[in-house]
Image (cartoon, grey):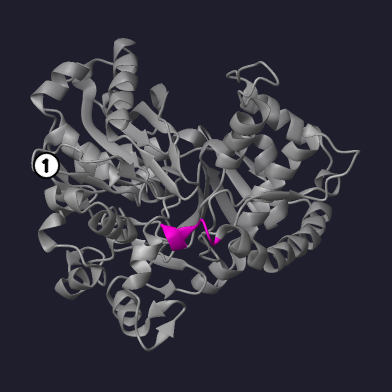
Amino acid sequence: MTDAQQYVLSIDLGTSGCKVGLVSLTGEVVAWAFRPVELIVIDSIGAEQRPQNWWDAFVDATREILNRRVVPPSNIVAICASTQGESTVAVDRNGQCLMNAILWLDMRGAHHLRNTMRGKLKVAGYDALKLQKWLRLCGGAPALSGKDPAGHMLLIRNAFPEIYAKTYKFLNVLDYMNLRLTGRFCATQDSILTSWVTDNRRPDDIRYDDALIAMSGIDRDKFPDIVHCADVIGTIRSEVAETLGLPPQTPVVAGAIDNSAAAIGAGTIDDFDCHLYVGSSSWIAAHVPFKRTNVFDQITSIPCAVPSRYLMIALQTSGANNIAFLKDRIVFHDDGLIRGEPSIDTYRVLDEIAARQPIGADGALYLPWLFGERCPVDDPLLRAGIFNLGMDHNRETIVRAVFEGVALNTRWTMKPIQRFMRKRPEVMTMIGGGAMSNTWCRIYADVLNLAIRQPCDPLKANARGAAFIAAHGLGLMRLDEAARQVKIERIYEPTPSAAAFYDERFGIFTELHDRLAPIYHKLNGSKGTQNA
């Protein structure tokens, strides 16, 4: 069998749903299917999903692509997943879920986390002694917003003690999918990261630290064993193989959290080569040779799938979910006023609307903080808003403003990233669903004032990355060889006049944050994380 005949069944499970692809070792996606997954929002600060919905979406999408018989099942050499991270699933000893998964958007754990930060001396909201230990060993610290497993597990321990007592293991999304595939309870070195209980000083030897576990307030035996992203963790369970129509001995490679897989699928494997992901959330990331943390800017370098390297990550809460919000809650909201349903062409139409509107949206400006923000400020009480609307504006104006506002928010991270890497990026590869928009790629190039590389099939970068991790784990290809398979379709160079315009507009954007943050705290503080 030649390399071209070998395929990986790649899972890309994000917040919006599950995408499944058959990916060749050269990065070609020969079959693709998507199934949406419901997001459950609780009192504007909680966010959950049903793990069974993840699994059902995966099974249904996999059956669809395998039924097309594009390749024989015997040519599928592995299964490997990339998933949303920083979410928490409590399972019992039989692997059964005890409650809904608490997602990376959820802020209900903030109140419980704050109680662990009590101390005489605080730095940036943290107990100084605990912060020193977290930074020295982990390279980061629990999000004070409560949006990671450190806060989620405390929420379960304190607010749902009966669930906590029954919990055998706390798993991330990736860990849960691997459990369903193989029956094995384990976590990867990147999925366990934001539990903040591991010593990460040696990237190829991530291990639990007893003192950090004691600081977490969670029982040691509730954490799963740690494996490497490229480890073969077992073969597919016989009943799953029968359900999907795969050979029963198909290997399962551990895989990676979405930002780690995306960095490989984007082809940005060299040190300091940045990629920009625009999906439900948004981030800028690059592999770096050092562990470093800037707690004030909320940027750190974390364990990842590339051996002997860390991944610098500047994660923002909202990205293309602002466009989804515009589509689902504004344009097609089912309130009886207007009858209609979004079509498969809705995003294309929104893209065309944004393209034909003038730069600057006729003075309208959008702030994209639907669920608070994480970088460069960790503030769960910020909210979205559109400013400076006039009688000459319309829905098309708002569409353009939303596209620009998300890009301006990304620009907010650029100076901190430059300080962190000690060099300014000159080019960036844009991936995720947002990178399918030519208009958005153009806007990002102008707003960030740097060249934007748009790869072929940017939506499928995570699945491609998972396939490359699997190929590496099976010894079929090195990761640097895999990254060279990624093809760039187009490069967007910044337009000097547009870049100068957005320089001025960005100043207004940050001024709005500075002036409005206290008002957001007054409006949202009483119903926000204080009462979680």
Q: Outermost residue toward the right? A: 392
Q: Residue furthest top?
A: 68
Instruction: Give the dominant element type of the magenta stretch: helix, strand or loop.
Output: loop
Q: Nearer the viewer, residue 309 or 506?
A: 506
The C terminus lies in which quarter of the figure?
A: bottom left
Residue segment shown in magenta:
525-532
Q: Return the x and y of residue 271 as percentages of the image width and height.
A: 43, 62
Give the residue at x 41% y 42%: 265
Residue 287 lies in the magenta stretch: no
Q: Residue at x 13, y 52 (%)?
A: 165
Residue 495 higher or lower than 416, as above or below = above
Q: Residue 114 or 142: which is nearer the viewer?
A: 114
Residue 23 percent location from the top left of the image:
35, 29
Which type of secondary structure does the marked residue at label 1 adopt? Answer: loop
Disc 1 marks a residue whose amino acid type is Arg
The image shows residue 143, relative to residue 439, as above or below, that is: below
Which quarter of the image is occupied by the N terminus?
Answer: top left
Exactly how many numbered labels are in the figure?
A: 1
The quarter of the displayed image where residue 343 is located: top right
* Residue 258 image point, x, y percent: 38, 46
Mark 1 is surrounded, within 10 Å at the Cα level, by few (under 14), some (14 to 19) or many (20 or more) other residues, namely some
Question: Does residue 531 belong to the magenta stretch?
Answer: yes
Residue 351: x %, y % from top left:
69, 31
For the point 50% across and 74% down, the residue is: 296
Q: Is residue 412 left or right of residue 378?
A: right
- Residue topped by disc 1: 184
